[in-house]
Image (cartoon, rainbow, N blue to C red):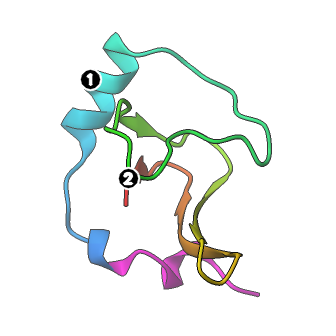
Amino acid sequence: MTTNKQFNTYKEGLDMEALREYCMEHGERRVMECGETLEEAGEPAQWVAFLEHGCFKYMVHNDEEGKDYCMGFTFDGEPLWQ
């Protein structure tokens, strides 16, 4: 069984608590459905978010190949960005 401890190791040691608290205080809770898009590639980012529960998958579409590729994951308690 794979756990999230094997992913996103570059985030180890980062203290994101102040940013998480800001999001919780000033943001809004949003429930996303599987496959729903948060941001589009090439567009200015509009969101700062933390994942409360679940898994978020970052996908990119390669127009030349006509394929989608997974570029990363976010897990419980982690910020959403890549």
Which residue lies under the disc numbered 2?
81
The residues colored magenta run: 1-9
What SS does tag 1 mark? helix
Where residue 79 appears, as percent x and y from the top left, is 39, 48
What SS does tag 2 mark? loop
Q: Amino acid at mark 1?
A: Tyr
Which residue lies under the disc numbered 1?
22
Residue at 56% in and 19% down: 29
Where residue 35 appears, as percent x and y from the top left, is 77, 48
Residue at 45% in and 52% down: 41
- Judge whether residue 81 is colored magenta: no
Where residue 47 appears, as percent x and y from the top left, is 38, 32
The quarter of the picture where residue 38 lies is: top right
Asked whether the residues under the numbered discs 1 and 2 touch, taking CB atoms below 8 Å apart as contact, a structural biologist would say no
Q: Is residue 25 above or below residue 79?
A: above
Between label 1 and label 2, give the one nearer the viewer: 2
Where residue 49 appears, as percent x and y from the top left, is 41, 36
The span from disc 1 to disc 2 (Cα, nearest Å) is 16 Å
